[in-house]
Protein backbone atom coordinates (compact mmCIF):
# COMPACT_ATOMS: atom_id res chain seq x y z
CA UNK A 1 0.00 0.00 0.00
CA UNK A 2 2.93 2.33 0.58
CA UNK A 3 3.91 2.03 -3.08
CA UNK A 4 0.35 2.99 -4.03
CA UNK A 5 0.53 5.98 -1.66
CA UNK A 6 3.70 7.09 -3.46
CA UNK A 7 2.02 6.75 -6.85
CA UNK A 8 -0.97 8.86 -5.81
CA UNK A 9 1.48 11.23 -4.10
CA UNK A 10 -0.36 11.25 -0.81
CA UNK A 11 0.29 10.31 2.79
CA UNK A 12 -3.47 10.42 3.29
CA UNK A 13 -4.20 7.14 1.53
CA UNK A 14 -6.93 5.16 3.28
CA UNK A 15 -7.81 1.59 2.38
CA UNK A 16 -9.94 -1.41 3.31
CA UNK A 17 -9.06 -4.99 2.45
CA UNK A 18 -11.99 -7.40 2.26
CA UNK A 19 -14.56 -4.62 2.48
CA UNK A 20 -18.18 -5.88 2.83
CA UNK A 21 -19.44 -4.28 -0.39
CA UNK A 22 -21.76 -6.97 -1.74
CA UNK A 23 -24.13 -7.63 1.16
CA UNK A 24 -27.21 -6.57 -0.83
CA UNK A 25 -26.69 -8.87 -3.83
CA UNK A 26 -27.02 -12.66 -4.03
CA UNK A 27 -23.97 -14.84 -4.14
CA UNK A 28 -21.53 -16.68 -1.98
CA UNK A 29 -18.95 -13.92 -1.43
CA UNK A 30 -19.76 -10.58 0.20
CA UNK A 31 -16.33 -8.94 0.16
CA UNK A 32 -14.50 -6.60 -2.21
CA UNK A 33 -10.77 -7.38 -2.27
CA UNK A 34 -9.59 -3.78 -1.89
CA UNK A 35 -11.09 -0.30 -1.59
CA UNK A 36 -8.85 2.75 -1.34
CA UNK A 37 -9.09 6.54 -1.46
CA UNK A 38 -7.47 9.85 -0.63
CA UNK A 39 -10.78 11.71 -0.95
CA UNK A 40 -13.77 10.10 0.79
CA UNK A 41 -16.09 11.11 -2.06
CA UNK A 42 -13.97 9.33 -4.71
CA UNK A 43 -13.09 5.74 -3.86
CA UNK A 44 -11.45 3.07 -5.99
CA UNK A 45 -12.49 -0.60 -5.93
CA UNK A 46 -10.20 -3.48 -6.94
CA UNK A 47 -10.79 -7.18 -7.40
CA UNK A 48 -7.88 -9.63 -7.82
CA UNK A 49 -7.60 -13.15 -9.18
CA UNK A 50 -4.54 -15.39 -9.07
CA UNK A 51 -5.42 -18.74 -10.67
CA UNK A 52 -2.34 -20.92 -10.36
CA UNK A 53 -1.47 -24.54 -10.95
CA UNK A 54 -1.08 -26.15 -7.54
CA UNK A 55 0.94 -29.07 -8.90
CA UNK A 56 -1.91 -31.58 -8.76
CA UNK A 57 -3.84 -30.46 -11.81
CA UNK A 58 -5.16 -27.16 -13.07
CA UNK A 59 -6.69 -24.34 -11.04
CA UNK A 60 -10.33 -25.28 -11.75
CA UNK A 61 -10.29 -23.14 -14.86
CA UNK A 62 -14.02 -23.23 -15.62
CA UNK A 63 -14.97 -22.03 -12.13
CA UNK A 64 -12.23 -19.38 -12.10
CA UNK A 65 -13.37 -17.99 -15.45
CA UNK A 66 -16.86 -17.62 -13.98
CA UNK A 67 -15.37 -15.84 -10.94
CA UNK A 68 -13.48 -13.46 -13.23
CA UNK A 69 -16.72 -12.44 -14.93
CA UNK A 70 -18.52 -12.28 -11.58
CA UNK A 71 -15.89 -9.86 -10.24
CA UNK A 72 -16.09 -7.66 -13.35
CA UNK A 73 -19.91 -7.51 -13.06
CA UNK A 74 -19.68 -6.76 -9.34
CA UNK A 75 -17.27 -3.90 -9.95
CA UNK A 76 -19.72 -2.44 -12.48
CA UNK A 77 -22.47 -2.83 -9.88
CA UNK A 78 -20.42 -0.86 -7.31
CA UNK A 79 -19.52 1.91 -9.76
CA UNK A 80 -23.16 2.25 -10.90
CA UNK A 81 -24.74 2.00 -7.44
CA UNK A 82 -26.50 5.20 -6.31
CA UNK A 83 -25.17 6.74 -3.12
CA UNK A 84 -21.93 4.81 -3.42
CA UNK A 85 -18.61 6.64 -3.21
CA UNK A 86 -16.90 4.10 -5.49
CA UNK A 87 -16.24 5.91 -8.75
CA UNK A 88 -13.89 3.55 -10.60
CA UNK A 89 -13.12 -0.17 -10.49
CA UNK A 90 -10.11 -2.21 -11.56
CA UNK A 91 -9.98 -5.93 -12.20
CA UNK A 92 -6.48 -7.44 -12.03
CA UNK A 93 -5.45 -11.03 -12.79
CA UNK A 94 -2.20 -12.98 -12.85
CA UNK A 95 -1.83 -16.65 -13.80
CA UNK A 96 0.81 -19.29 -14.39
CA UNK A 97 -1.47 -21.36 -16.66
CA UNK A 98 -1.40 -21.00 -20.45
CA UNK A 99 -5.00 -22.18 -20.68
CA UNK A 100 -6.29 -18.77 -19.55
CA UNK A 101 -4.48 -16.86 -22.28
CA UNK A 102 -5.48 -19.20 -25.15
CA UNK A 103 -8.77 -19.70 -26.98
CA UNK A 104 -9.56 -23.34 -26.44
CA UNK A 105 -13.32 -23.11 -26.86
CA UNK A 106 -14.07 -23.04 -23.14
CA UNK A 107 -17.26 -24.97 -22.35
CA UNK A 108 -18.30 -22.23 -19.92
CA UNK A 109 -18.27 -19.49 -22.63
CA UNK A 110 -16.58 -17.24 -20.09
CA UNK A 111 -13.76 -16.37 -22.44
CA UNK A 112 -10.68 -14.71 -20.95
CA UNK A 113 -8.12 -15.50 -23.66
CA UNK A 114 -5.67 -12.97 -25.08
CA UNK A 115 -7.37 -10.63 -27.52
CA UNK A 116 -10.97 -11.44 -26.54
CA UNK A 117 -13.16 -8.35 -26.65
CA UNK A 118 -16.40 -8.53 -24.67
CA UNK A 119 -19.29 -6.53 -26.13
CA UNK A 120 -22.98 -6.53 -25.29
CA UNK A 121 -23.50 -8.85 -28.29
CA UNK A 122 -21.44 -11.64 -26.72
CA UNK A 123 -23.15 -14.79 -25.54
CA UNK A 124 -21.66 -14.74 -22.03
CA UNK A 125 -24.09 -15.88 -19.32
CA UNK A 126 -24.81 -13.36 -16.58
CA UNK A 127 -23.70 -14.31 -13.09
CA UNK A 128 -25.78 -13.24 -10.08
CA UNK A 129 -28.07 -11.38 -12.56
CA UNK A 130 -25.62 -8.49 -12.76
CA UNK A 131 -24.86 -6.84 -16.12
CA UNK A 132 -21.35 -6.55 -17.45
CA UNK A 133 -19.75 -3.33 -18.70
CA UNK A 134 -20.63 -2.68 -22.35
CA UNK A 135 -17.15 -3.37 -23.64
CA UNK A 136 -13.88 -4.64 -22.17
CA UNK A 137 -10.82 -6.48 -23.44
CA UNK A 138 -8.67 -9.32 -22.22
CA UNK A 139 -5.13 -8.31 -23.11
CA UNK A 140 -2.42 -10.35 -21.45
CA UNK A 141 1.15 -9.19 -20.88
CA UNK A 142 4.30 -11.24 -20.34
CA UNK A 143 3.28 -13.71 -23.07
CA UNK A 144 4.89 -14.80 -26.32
CA UNK A 145 3.73 -16.71 -29.38
CA UNK A 146 4.15 -20.46 -29.44
CA UNK A 147 4.37 -23.12 -32.14
CA UNK A 148 3.59 -25.93 -29.68
CA UNK A 149 0.01 -27.05 -30.38
CA UNK A 150 -0.35 -28.53 -26.88
CA UNK A 151 0.43 -25.20 -25.23
CA UNK A 152 -1.68 -23.09 -27.57
CA UNK A 153 -0.98 -20.01 -29.65
CA UNK A 154 0.40 -18.13 -26.63
CA UNK A 155 2.57 -19.12 -23.69
CA UNK A 156 3.60 -17.11 -20.69
CA UNK A 157 6.96 -15.41 -20.97
CA UNK A 158 8.28 -16.01 -17.49
CA UNK A 159 6.61 -17.44 -14.43
CA UNK A 160 3.32 -15.53 -14.79
CA UNK A 161 1.14 -13.84 -17.41
CA UNK A 162 -0.46 -10.56 -16.34
CA UNK A 163 -3.84 -9.30 -17.52
CA UNK A 164 -3.86 -5.61 -18.33
CA UNK A 165 -6.22 -4.15 -15.73
CA UNK A 166 -9.84 -3.98 -16.83
CA UNK A 167 -11.11 -0.55 -15.88
CA UNK A 168 -14.78 0.02 -15.01
CA UNK A 169 -16.06 3.62 -14.95
Image (cartoon, rainbow, N blue to C red):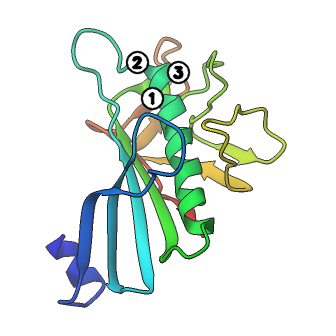
Residue visible at 45% across and 21% down in the picture? 61
The residue pinned by badge 3 equals: 152
Sequence order check: which comes first, mark 3 or mark 1? 1
Compared to residue 167, the image places residue 57 above or below, namely above
Mark 2 lies on a secondary structure that is loop
Whether pointer 1 and pointer 2 mark residues with C-beta atoms closer than 8 Å, the reply is yes
**Which quadrant holds residue 28?**
top left
Mark 1 lies on a secondary structure that is helix
Residue 51 place in picture, x, y as percent: 35, 31
The residue pinned by badge 1 equals: 64
Residue that sits furthest to the right in the current view? 121
Residue visible at 48% across and 16% down in the picture? 148
Sequence order check: which comes first, mark 2 or mark 3? 2
Location of the N terminus (image quadrant):
bottom left
The residue pinned by badge 2 equals: 60
The crowd level at tag 2 (other Cα within 10 Å; few <14, some 14-19, many 20+) is few
Left or right placement of residue 147 versus residue 104 in this view: left
Compared to residue 73, the image places residue 40 above or below, namely below
Amino acid sequence: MWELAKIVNSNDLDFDFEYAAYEDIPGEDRFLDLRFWTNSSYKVAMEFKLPVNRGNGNSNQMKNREKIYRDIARLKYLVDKEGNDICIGFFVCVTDENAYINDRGSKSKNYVYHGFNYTNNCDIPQIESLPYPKNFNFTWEKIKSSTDKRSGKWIKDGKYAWLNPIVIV
